[in-house]
Structures are given as structure tokens and as C-alpha cells.
Image (cartoon, rainbow, N blue to C red):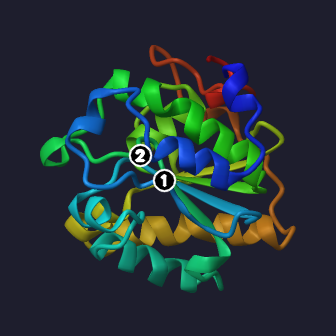
């Protein structure tokens, strides 16, 4: 991380910089920067992929149908939206809701990294492939990553499907998310002992999960 980001002491300062950011081409087509929202000292931080149309219009993360489902599932583990902090890998909507490109993800990494450092959550929940692969520094897909709580950078990371996948995939995917959020509840209650069998770890030829450095390794 550059010295300029390390010197930022509050989320408000960081957001003020993000609101005028032109680090990648997504700035040209955005309506609003979707920086993040929620409790600035939350125990749980949720990281999605990229804003959609409604998020771009309102400047808030997860305000559409995916957000409604996420709030419902959080409620099932006794968490409300204002109990957590929600952000995305990229802060601006990609055109036509396409997947964020590698250069766009790279440009936004300092914001997400500093958000995590300032919030300092006990648990990070990654929703979908992009956030899970980025933070765990792996090419392994979300289907194989999920279902496990990883010890990560002095905290826990729980990858799960994006709520949009549940809206497409139905009750089976929704129940998988429920299971993963149940791990979060166990961590918060001090009831989860992380002991990952070797057979559950991502296998070659894909890179193994880096549970120590993750997002924080590179500038």
C-alpha cells in the first residue's frame, strides 16, 4: 500500500478520496462511487464483487434483490444490516454489469485493504468468486472454497456464494449460504474451532489458498 493510503486514519477520509477516484476506466461510466456502508467498527465485514445498476444509482451496496436476500439470511443468524459493514471489490459499476477486469480489481485494492484495516473485523465474509479468490489469493472457485472457515490475517474468512447465485439457483444454493453463515455465527459465539482436514483444502494443479497474506501482500 502506498504511503498516502497508510496515512488515512478514518473511513470518512478514505471515502472522500474514493468519491473522486479515477484510478481505472470505471470512473468514466459511474453515476456514484459505491464505497461501502455499515458499522465502522463491525465484527463482521462482507465483501461482494461489484455494484449493480441500483447500487450505482443510490451509491449504496446491496440495495436490490440480492441485498434483500442477504439481509434475510443475516437475520437468521441474528445480525442486522447495521451490525455489519458491506463493501465490494470494486467501487464502481462495470458497464452492463460485466465481471470486473483484473486491472480494475487491482486499482481498487488499496481502498478495500484500508477499509479492512480500519474496520478490523473478526470475520470477513466473501460473496462469490471474485472477492473469495482475491482475498484468499487462489484460482480455486467458490464452489470448492465455500463450506470452510479459514484462519486469515489474524481473523477468520468465510467464503460463500453471492446472493445473486441463490436467486438464480434456488433453495439449494440458499441453503449452502445458510450453512456458511452458520459458521460465522459460531465464530462470533466462540463455538467454532477451525481444524481443516487436508482433504478439504484446494488441490493441485490450482494454487493452494494463501491464508496468511491474502489481499495485504501486494501494493
- Secondary structure category for the residue under label 1: loop
Q: Residues within 10 Å of mark 1 (few under 14, many from 20)?
A: many
Task: Name the residue carrying label 2.
Answer: 91
Identify the residue at horizontal 32%, vertical 68% (top origin). 58
Tell me if I can see residue 210 in this picture: yes
**CA distance separating discs 2 and 1:** 6 Å
- Asked if 80 appears above or below 108 in the picture, the reply is below
Quarter of the image for the C terminus: give it: top right
- Asked if 74 appears above or below 122 in the picture, the reply is below
Count of numbered badges drawn on the protein: 2
- Residue 104, horizontal then vertical, whole percent: 36, 28
Q: State which tag comes first along the sequence, 2 or 1.
A: 1
Task: Name the residue carrying label 1.
Answer: 35
Q: Residues within 10 Å of mark 2 (few under 14, many from 20)?
A: many
| Relative side of 142 to 193, left or right | left
- Residue 131, horizontal then vertical, whole percent: 47, 42
Residue 82's label in the rendered image is: none
Tell me if I can see residue 150 in this picture: no
Identify the residue at horizontal 60%, vertical 83% (top origin). 80
- Secondary structure category for the residue under label 2: loop
Q: Nearer the viewer, residue 118 or 124?
A: 118
Q: Nearer the viewer, residue 26 or 177?
A: 26
- Residue 59: quarter of image: bottom left
The reply to whether discs 2 and 1 touch (Cβ–Cβ < 8 Å) is: yes
Identify the residue at horizontal 12%, vertical 47% (top origin). 96
- Asked if 10 appears above or below 65 in the picture, the reply is above
- Residue 68: quarter of image: bottom left
- Residue 120, horizontal then vertical, whole percent: 78, 51
Q: Nearer the viewer, residue 110 or 153?
A: 110
Farthest residue toward the top?
205
- Residue 75, horizontal then vertical, whole percent: 56, 85
| Relative side of 217 to 101, left or right | right
Amino acid at each position: 500500500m502506498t504511503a498516502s493510503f497508510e496515512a488515512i486514519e478514518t473511513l470518512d477520509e478514505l471515502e472522500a478520496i474514493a468519491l473522486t477516484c479515477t484510478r481505472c476506466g470505471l470512473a468514466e461510466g459511474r453515476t456514484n462511487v459505491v464505497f461501502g456502508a455499515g458499522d465502522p467498527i463491525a465484527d463482521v465485514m462482507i465483501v461482494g464483487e461489484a455494484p449493480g445498476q441500483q447500487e450505482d444509482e443510490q451509491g449504496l451496496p446491496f440495495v436490490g434483490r440480492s441485498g434483500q436476500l442477504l439481509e434475510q439470511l443475516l437475520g437468521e443468524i441474528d445480525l442486522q444490516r447495521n451490525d455489519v459493514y458491506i463493501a465490494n471489490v470494486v467501487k464502481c459499476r462495470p458497464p452492463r454489469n460485466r465481471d470486473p477486469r483484473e486491472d480494475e480489481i487491482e486499482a481498487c485494492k488499496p481502498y478495500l485493504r484500508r477499509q479492512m484495516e480500519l474496520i478490523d473485523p473478526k470475520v470477513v465474509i466473501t460473496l462469490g468468486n471474485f472477492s473469495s479468490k482475491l482475498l484468499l489469493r487462489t484460482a480455486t472457485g467458490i464452489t470448492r472454497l465455500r463450506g470452510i472457515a479459514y484462519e486469515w490475517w489474524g481473523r477468520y474468512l468465510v467464503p460463500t456464494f453471492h446472493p445473486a447465485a441463490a436467486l438464480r439457483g434456488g433453495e439449494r444454493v440458499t441453503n449452502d449460504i445458510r450453512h456458511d453463515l452458520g459458521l460465522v455465527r459460531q465464530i462470533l459465539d466462540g463455538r467454532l474451532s477451525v481444524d481443516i482436514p487436508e482433504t478439504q483444502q484446494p488441490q493441485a494443479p490450482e494454487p493452494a489458498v494463501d491464508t496468511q497474506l491474502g489481499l495485504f501482500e501486494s501494493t
